[in-house]
Image (spheres, coloured by chain):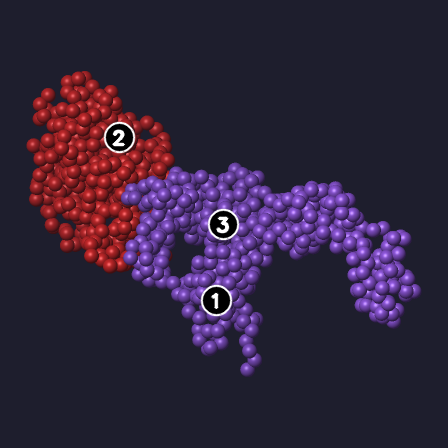
Chain colours: A red, B purple
Amino acid sequence: MSAEDLIALTAAQAVEKIRAGETSAADVYEAYRQRAAADELNAFVYVPDAVPDELPATDTPLAGLPLGVKDLFCTEGLPSQSGSKILEGYRPPYTATVVRNLQDAGASILGKTNQDEFAMGSSNENSAYGPVQNPWDRTKVPGGSSGGSAAAVAAGLVPWALGTDTGGSIRQPAALTGIVGLKPTYGSCSRYGMIAFASSLDQAGPLARDVTDTALLFKHMVGRDHCDSTSLDYPEEVKLPTAQRLDGIRLGVPEELSGEGIEPGVLESFNRVLDLARELGATVESMKLPHAPHALSAYYVLAPAEASSNLARFDGVRYGMRAEGTRDLLSMYTKTRHDGFGPEVKRRIMLGTYALSAGYYDAYYGRAQQVRTKIAEDFHTAFERFDFIVTPTAPTVAFGLGAKTDDPWAMYLNDFCTVPISLAGIPAISIPSGLSEGLPVGFQMAGPAFSENRILDAAFALEQGIGFDGSKARA
Amino acid sequence: MSKVEWEPVIGLEIHVQLATNTKMFCSCALGFGEPPNTRTCPVCLGLPGALPVVNARAIDYGLLIGLAVGSKLADRSIFHRKNYFYPDNPKAYQISQYDEPLCSGGQLGDVRIHRVHLEEDAAKLVHGGGSGRIHGSATSVVDFNRGGTPLVEIVTEPDVRSGEHARAWLTMLRETVRQLGISDVDMSQGSLRCDANVSIRPKGEERFGTKTELKNMNSFAFLEQGVKAEIARQIAIKEAGDEVVQETLHFDPRTGAITSLRSKEEAHDYRYFPEPDLVPIAITSEMLERAKAALPELPTQRAERYESSLGLSADNARDLSFRPEITPYFEAAAAVDGAEPQVVANWLLNELIPRLGETAPADSRVSTDAFGAFAALVGAKKITPTAAKQVLDRLVAEGGSPEAIVEAEGLGAMEGGDELSGIVDAALAANEAAAEKIRGGNMKAIGPIIGHVMRETKGRADGGEVTRLVREKLGL
């Protein structure tokens, strides 16, 4: 098969072709490797020089297929810098559990993908290794923080990729680049080896070209890990989706997340999917998530609070960067952190440190935890009446590089529809719903904890009806 | 103006390193003097992405300590992060417990317990040159072997009143924990550490004075000395009309000097928050049952038993219960036929131990059987106290059986009767002046006469019997 033919295959299709002997894992790897090495989007921060000497056997579930891995996953012997200068050159001595699970299932790492520094950002412009361009329009951002993974999958530089989602970091870039992204139930995938941003929110998840590939990758990620106390046994086998219809499915559309602040073109695309859902047999009803509008405020207390603690270990003592020319401990700490962290990371460390300070803890962290509980209760109540809650994934299509870099709050608003779901710890998928002004729009569907199989099935049915064509981005 | 009488108010914070197989939050074996940084992994090095997992054994051990000091055991407990920057702390936070500790309240002896919680130990810093501290040293290196060792922190209420009290109580705590078999509790090795919060107040005053935290007292003697020195320092400050400043202090046992320690961060705001990488600990009834079943007889319980069942004095009961190097010896000797526990206790504490110096009784030539038999002879007055001391000297020097020594040396107590009567007659004849005084009612003058008899009998005579005979013969 020609390289062009190979790139046109979805991951699931490529696995079949390798199994059938129509191509080899090495050919597929090399076809993608060449594209990744020639990457002009800056989606990759590391790509190997050659196909590995040994690729996994073709009878493994993933048949040796190449995988993009977000920079923040520790990969033994490979750069793992979390998009930060402070970890420049850092090659960890161990591999993240999720990556190892996928390697055990037959995935081979194609490279490490660019990201916002420590996963803090919604445009991938906060990377110390430069911004990533959106393959649909090189003047636009790919979203973030898993912007490198999303752009690489959309542009056909890799069949699929790993991302992480803390407040929307898989779903929003998936939406902005016209691919599928799944943020799993908190605890379904091990966090061991993921360089932490906000521990109570971080989840690994797949970014892929379609829902089937998403399910296939997710299937081999899940499971309890004895190295992560917050991980859980996935209660059922993850299945590849097959549903054609949505009969009896009840969709709830939260008023708070589907009106004000959403771009008209995005809303139009969203409403077309709702019409399609009705045609496929679903009921669609407007509903309320009364505390959802407070989600961003709570998130920007809790996530920075945890981050301020998680990122304190980057002090120049043991690994990564150490500022030169300092004379004592305190100046080594301060200069290393001053030089090593970018402005958004510093902003969040400051926010989080403040929120945890004596005398402010109750008013900020304590209060934000209460809001988080209320939001989770809103969803819990909603799932008594609805199978899924649906919203646009992001309020806008991809915006221009540099358009929001001076306005943190405008940037934070990108996650307006994704953050409430993150706070509730429940799973959600983003699938492409169409184009607006020539750029992809994402449709988000959230379900109760561990409802991934049902979400994937429903998303698959919608995907067939939508018929989104992402090939333009791979051209 | 009358002089103010000051009352010291002292609370102790004790850290006990648990002798688990592995560290608190990872599967590294505990370090015991291996080459630096050989007992480490991504978790205890705080590498990016690594996550802690709680050592279940450490929780069991924490519960045991809680039970031993009468704490209320939580049914749910959580870990917090205590955030501070220091090179001995690779995550820049210590995983500790804050407002939901494993155990709360309790009492050991006369000191109430505030709380008992679990945490992880810091790594070891070694400073090259300079002051021996990080400030001013040319280089500092970190050994992470110790980092992550499970620690139990025990915090007392401010019920301690003196340096001696602190030392005695900590000894009691050490023996209690040692009985549990969960720690080496060795202050010189750092598996038992004690800080003291010290303040003073005028006697009768309810309010506490400003407290200081005294660190680096790595022996029982230094704890006593340090607390005494700090109390004296505070009294001197108050009596000079000044105020005590709240600070962390360092006690130098060589010079006895107390100096202010620089704080780990300029301002102490640890920004505690619940550790999101760990789930709450649910204490199950099985865990509680397991802990209760593993609880041995504790020193306080043993002391009560010695007092109530063996009839020992309260002081002896305490002494014997809290000293593991003599407790089993005492029990075995007291179990010998005819040995009175109180006699065993007296002769063990007052005579045998002083004769042995550094050697523990169990390591001496005096077997527990021999010592028990010896106590039986003393109790039955088959040897006099004077003779008994000679027998004990021989036992300590050569071992063997006390009966054989008594037999060989002829040290058996003399029966009353003609032989003794004759010796007393001779003694009276040889000390006429003394005999006159006694006749005149001055019994104190009997000394030379008894001395004479004892010389003649090599101590085998019973002092009481000699006195009785003297009085009889002098018609008193």
Does residue A172 appear anywhere in the picture?
no
Q: Secondary structure at mark 2?
A: helix
List x then y, in percent, for residue B365: 64, 44
Does residue B242 appear anywhere in the picture?
yes
Give how far apart the Cα atoms at labels 1 and 2 are.
Answer: 61 Å
Callout 1 crowding tier (Cα within 10 Å): few <14, some 14–19, many ≥20: many
Residue in the foreground of this view, choosing between B70 and A172: B70
- Give the residue displayed 48% in from the left and 60% down from the top: B196
User: Farthest residue in the bottom direction?
Assistant: B1
In this view, A366 is above or below A421:
below
Same chain for labels 3 and 1? Say yes or no: yes
**Which amino acid does the dot numbered 3 rest on?**
Asp
Give how far apart the Cα atoms at labels 3 and 2 are.
Answer: 48 Å
Write down the chain letter for disc 3: B
* Residue that numbered label 1 is attached to: B230
**Which amino acid does the dot numbered 1 rest on?**
Glu
List x then y, in percent, for residue A406: 15, 54
* Residue that numbered label 2 is attached to: A102
Same chain for labels 1 and 2? Say yes or no: no
**Which amino acid does the dot numbered 2 rest on?**
Leu
Same chain for labels 3 and 2? Say yes or no: no
Marks 3 and 1, the one that precedes in the sequence: 3
Write down the chain letter for disc 2: A
Write down the chain letter for disc 1: B
- Give the residue displayed 35% in from the left and 34% down from the top: A224
List x then y, in percent, for residue B175: 56, 49
Residue B186: which numbered mark, if any?
Answer: 3
**Residue A466 found in image quarter:** top left
Q: Quadrant of the C terminus of chain B?
A: bottom right
